[in-house]
Image (spheres, rainbow, N blue to C red):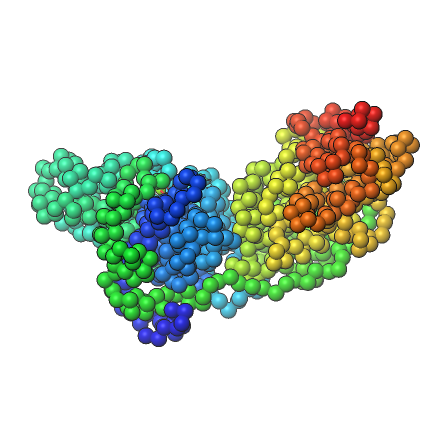
Amino acid sequence: MAVSKTGRAATVSPDALGAADRQRLLTELERKVLWLSSWTIHHANHIRANRDGVKVGGHQASSASVATLMTALYFDVLRPQDRAAVKPHASPVFHAIQYMLGQQSLEKLQGFRALGGAQSYPSRTKDTDDVDFSTGSVGLGVALTSFAALVQDYVRLKGLGDAGSPLGRMVAVVGDAELDEGNIFEALLEGWKHDVRNLWWVIDYNRQSLDAVVSDRLYSHIDQLFQNMGWRVVILKYGKKLERAFAGPDGEALRDWIDACPNSLYSALVYKGGEGWRKHLTGDLGHLAGIRAFLAAHDDERLHEVMTNLAGHDMGSVLEAFHAIEDDRPTCFIAYTIKGFGLPFAGHKDNHAGLMNENQMAVFQRSMKVPAGSEWDRFAGLQASQGEIEAFLATVPFVARGTRRLKAPAIPIPESLPVPSSQRQSTQEGFGRILSDLATGDSALARHIVTSSPDVTVSTNLGGWVNRRGLFDRHERSDVFREEKVVSAQRWQMSHTGQHIELGIAENNFFILMAALGLAEPIFGARLMPIGTLYDPFIARGLDALNYACYQNARFMLVATPSGITLAPEGGAHQSIGTPLIGLAQDGLTAFEPAFVDELAVLMRWGFEHMQAPEGGAVYLRLSTRPVDQPKRLMTSGLQQAIVSGGYWLSPPSPGAELAIVCQGAVVPEATGAFREILEDIPGAGLLAVTSADRLHQEWLAGKRAGASSHIEGLLEPLAADAALVTVLDGHPATLSWLGAVSRHRVQPLGVEHFGQSGDIPDLYRVYGLDSDAILDAVARACLRRI
Ligand SMILES: Cc1ncc(C[n+]2csc(CCOP(=O)(O)OP(=O)(O)O)c2C)c(N)n1
Ligand SMILES: [Mg+2]
């Protein structure tokens, strides 16, 4: 067989080998994967030098549990167009598989969990071996596959991406305890609404979580749950050896016994081994001649082998089940497995973080027939020859196209976005009008924008865009209200040409959809410009998913509105205080809070570029429903630059000025009002508008490290060395209070520290200390008392 330099033969057909040979070699590879994953963890914990005394960790038991399933998937079932999310703690198995496929280096395996080495949990951004979807926070990767399936349909039905390639399956390898995460069920329901296709969830049903053996009752309903959502459920329960035993004399009784065996007892017996099985089977079924004969015919070792022969560890059963699926119906495989299968702590309830000790590893190594010194050898310990294994690896469909990071051409962004003219408007309204305006044209940008919202489309001003661009659905669905001539401002016709994906109220789903849309380029080869809207306070509801999207470097524009206490009568529970700090701290997300609509237009334009830039990222715009008088000004390139950099002087200070008021977002009228009053007493004072505390802060730190001056230092430069800053925003005061550290100015930080009551803006700003009087008081404190 011709093998290329990279170890891959491009032209070898998987069918060249017979099914029996393939299964034999896959079983060999399964052993190898089990060995390598266990050894990688062992090496990191017991062999590599430990400099700080902190446990390195890694999950040998969780990895062993899934070795068969993942071997079958990666070496046989998955095709280049398929995409997978692997349960986080199976990372060593994933890396071992990639190592065998020539896509992971020895150095990275030896550096498992070390800087620059293979990551603890598969990571798109930090690993180099072709991770499709990062995982780590359980449940999120699973849900992502469902939204990725939706995005695949979206992209295909729009004719974007590689239309010639067959549709891929989105596959999640799921730990059974991941199903305790509510986000999975939210995703299941949303997926059902959107009729997602080409989705496989393979549940590693070892009936153990981190702390415990899971309740028997809880899991008896999993299959029904999936079926209710229209899924096919395939249960892989018993392997071929057990099935043969069930087919023998009194085999039915054996099946009944094992079926009724509580999870905890089964796990305990798995751990105890042959003797334990014999004792229980003799006690419970010893009166049956067939069972007595069965026990007599098996020594302890073989009895253990048969009784632990669950289908999730039986290569033949696994392959049969996977290959039987040929249609695109979502399918859930519930594969019975044993946590730690093949390792000394198999089945033990405390095995989650368990590591083999030196002696156990030595025994395991002998059983794997890996000679000392050949631990990393890709072929050591296998019965098949290196040539045979290499020839087989050259047929693996998953890597037939090499690594699968796809690219799509950049989308041209207009020089400027039109600013909706209105003497007085809110940033939220301006956002809706900017998008509406884009919707009327046929720019490449407009064609690639896709919007979404968790049931707040209309109330975040996306209505105009949706009316023009329609809702996305795989099926044509008419707008019944419109057909019945019921007057409504909203036209909600659905079809596959639509460019808005409407979600139910589940912010977690929303952020996972943003992740899936924002990864459309590398995953599906189609660049999208996702814009998602939600109420600012509900960022917290989906925060882990937002973090997850950013961690994967997904590109999207998050428009959060309304925000702060400025939503006023809408009130208490909807007030967001901490979100500006999230914007400041969230890696991969650049946060802005414009005060005026012309700023917003500049920032959206910049955002569309940033979402496409190699070193770019996601963008967060914190907007407001408060109508504000708009400035009449020329948007010079200098002003644009300053807005994007995070701030500019609305009214510049005189050289040596003693005071500046610094405001961010919707409080600009109060800041301006106070500023006008103090000009009488402090004529040289300045008024600074902050559009992005995040950008200012980031650049300030980077400048310090590089010994370069930053935008904020430049802005504050004209002020006197002992000048005072009064900072004000509708959010936590810490967002801007750090400005005092830039040039050692004295700061009086105003903002919101408490929340929870309705009111109008004058009342709430008075109560929380954001109104002009509060600003003037702060000015007085700063100037008069010199603190
Ligand atoms: C959101 C979240 N909470 C907690 C954890 C810590 N954790 C990692 S694995 C795990 C249990 C996993 O059990 P299961 O999914 O059944 O996988 P198994 O190890 O049995 O294969 C927990 C609680 C996590 N990674 N993510
Ligand atoms: Mg489990």
Name of the residue lying farthest toward the right: 680
Nearest to the observer: residue 547 or residue 13: 547
Across and down, in percent, residue 170 comes to: 45, 55
Q: Is residue 722 above or below residue 22?
A: above
Name which residue lies at 90% across and 35% down.
683
User: Quadrant location of the C terminus?
Assistant: top right
Classify the position of ligand 1 by quadrant: top left, top right, bottom left or bottom right: top left
Name which residue lies at 74% across and 39% down.
743
Q: Is residue 735 above or below residue 524?
A: above
Label count reads: 0
Across and down, in percent, residue 779 comes to: 81, 29
Name which residue lies at 85% across and 37% down.
657
Nearest to the observer: residue 483 or residue 132: 132
Q: Is residue 534 visible?
A: yes
Name which residue lies at 76% across and 57% down.
416
Nearest to the observer: residue 490 or residue 701: 701
Across and down, in percent, residue 36 comes to: 33, 54
Q: Is residue 536 visible?
A: no
Left or right of 39 in this view: 776:
right
Q: Is residue 361 above or below residue 71?
A: above
